[in-house]
Amino acid sequence: MTDPRTTVVVITHNRRPELLHTLDHLAELPEQPQVIVVDNASTDGTADAVSRHHPRVRLLCPGRNLGAIGRNLAVREVRTPYVAFCDDDSWWSPGALSGAADLLDRYPALATVTARILVEPGSAEDPINEELRNSPVPAPDWLPGPALGSFLAAATVLRTDTFGTAGGFHPRLWLGGEEELLAADLAANGWWLTYADHLTVHHQPSAVRDPTLRRAHGIRNTLWFTWLRRPAGPALRRTVYLARTVPHDRVSLRAFAEAAAALPWVLRERRVLPTEIEARMRILEEAQQRSAARRYVG
């Protein structure tokens, strides 16, 4: 059951064993998708290992760590109508790529399809699944699943041309919640995002990660998105909420300082969302504040 509609893009940095494990799974998929790996300046022999063990994989080596922006680089090389993102510690289940492509074929106003995430080993439900399943965003009758306000890159299939037209992930955000800005801009352009509970991605969290850096970037990027796209009142309210609820430590202080230092850039690029999209953001904000899956810890 080969399926030529989707290319899988994987970004990686110094996680050679995890990446090879992921590529082994992707090579076994019945869809047999083309796979593009962006090696973000790994120093652990990742590039050589990919070339040796998976010669059919297209390998891009930009020479520096681009973070999530490595995906933008890869998508420029994609020639299929759809692109599936994948982290180096996650992989798609057999049939999931075809299922997502079927939905995108069937619904021309749909930009993204996000799959259910199972945490390995053990295939436990990721807590975020329940939140996506019960998304409060009002959905049109035709949408095949819950409407989303954002998406999780490592579990999402997107329209290749739509991703490119929207500009991809903003280079300033680098990594950590980088999806929120792109998702809001897609919605502002009339696109819909959905969750598909019958499609599955597996995630085996890597032990090679810096949770404090990821937290700092997540807080910073949330603040940047908020002031880039939200009206002043809601932006101020969300900023105060974050200041009250994030851990009061050096990591959080660094995140707020980095966000504040970029204020001139934020004001130059600020573009408030249309009223109907802002209404979705407000609904989502209430649900996110109750979420057990969204905690800035580490």
Image (cartoon, grey):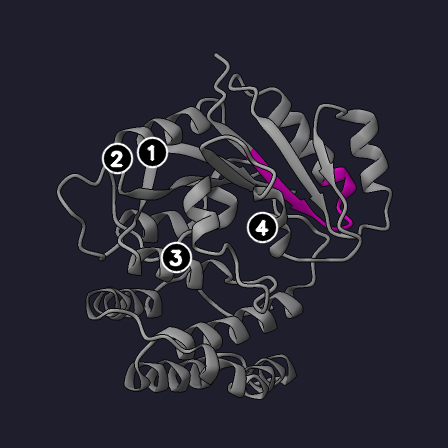
Q: Is residue 203 visible?
A: yes
Question: Identity of the amino acid at label 4?
Answer: Asn
Q: Which circle's residue, 1 or 3, is located before the other in the chain?
A: 1
- Compared to residue 65, the image places residue 108 above or below, namely above
Residue placed most toward the observer, 153 or 186: 186
Q: Which circle's residue, 1 or 4, is located before the other in the chain?
A: 4
The reply to whether dot 4 and dot 2 touch (C-beta < 8 Å) is no
- Residue at 27% over, 37% down: 108
**Magenta segment boundaries in residue numbering:** 8-18
Q: Position of residue 275 (x, y in %)?
A: 20, 71
Residue 110 in the figure: left or right of residue 23: left
Q: Position of residue 242 (x, y in %)?
A: 43, 80
Question: Identity of the amino acid at label 2?
Answer: Tyr
Q: Which circle's residue, 3 or 2, is located before the other in the chain?
A: 2
The reply to whether dot 3 and dot 2 touch (C-beta < 8 Å) is no
Quadrant of image for the C terminus: bottom right
* Residue 107: image tag: 2
Residue for badge 4: 72
Q: CA distance from mark 1 to mark 2?
A: 5 Å
Q: Position of residue 272 (x, y in %)?
A: 32, 75
Q: Which circle's residue, 4 or 2, is located before the other in the chain?
A: 4
Quadrant assignment, res 196: top left
The reply to whether dot 1 and dot 2 touch (C-beta < 8 Å) is yes
Question: Identity of the amino acid at label 1?
Answer: Leu
* Mark 4 closeness class: few <14, some 14–19, many ≥20 residues within 10 Å: some
The reply to whether dot 1 and dot 3 touch (C-beta < 8 Å) is no
* Residue 183: image tag: 3
Residue placed most toward the observer, 259 or 283: 259
Q: Position of residue 119 (x, y in %)?
A: 52, 42
Q: CA distance from mark 4 to mark 2?
A: 24 Å
Residue for badge 1: 104
